[in-house]
Image (spheres, grey):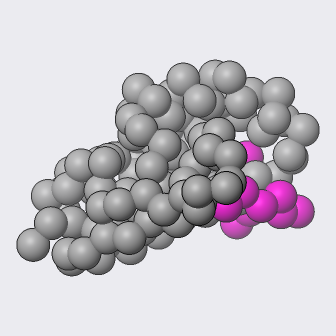
Amino acid sequence: MKVILPPEWPRPKGYANGVVAGGKTLFIAGMIGWNAQGEFESDDFAAQARQALKNIAEVLREAGGVPENIVRMTWYVTDKREYLAASREVGRAFREIIGAYNAAMTAVEVRALMEDRAKVEIEATAVLPE
């Protein structure tokens, strides 16, 4: 995997502008902040983001991958202000669970998610070594 950064551009904070990777592609469905039993343990944004990231890491492990194999993530949040207010805690969880910020990322505010209590949904794409 190679992170792409045009030479004149400033280094982005919390994501990569582009990623080149080769291998088997794993597409991970949108993960929300509930546990393996499908239950929410918290209505706190940062706690739900942490759990969604754990869920992504678990799917990766099941496929034989590791968080460093993630090349793209899309975050859907129901309240951008709540997301921004929790950014320090979310960043800490991201570093603990996923590690480096080498994925191309997009964050989008949406009106609602399919599960009423969900505040964040994260989908990911990983490229696993052959």
Residue 77 percent location from the top left of the image: 76, 52
- Most extreme residue toward the front, as rendered? 8
Q: Nearer the viewer, residue 21 or 92?
A: 21
Residue 8 percent location from the top left of the image: 67, 55
- Most extreme residue toward the left, as rendered? 130
* Res. 22 image quadrant: bottom left
Answer whether residue 117 is magenta in the image.
yes
Answer whether residue 118 is magenta in the image.
yes
Name the quadrant of the C terminus.
bottom left
Residue at 58% across / 49% down in the picture? 15
Residue 18 seen from this side: yes
* Res. 115 image quadrant: bottom right
Q: Is residue 105 left or right of residue 63?
A: right
Q: Is residue 44 above or below residue 1?
A: above
Q: Is residue 125 left or right of residue 75?
A: left
For the record, the magenta segment spans 106-119
Residue at 67% across / 61% down in the picture? 106
Residue at 90% across / 38% down in the picture? 81
Q: Is residue 115 left or right of residue 18?
A: right
Q: Nearer the viewer, residue 19 or 87?
A: 19
Residue 66 percent location from the top left of the image: 24, 49
Residue 104 percent location from the top left of the image: 54, 60
Name the quadrant of the N terminus.
bottom left
The secondary structure that dominates the magenta segment is loop
Q: Is residue 103 above or below residue 53?
A: below
Residue 28 seen from this side: no
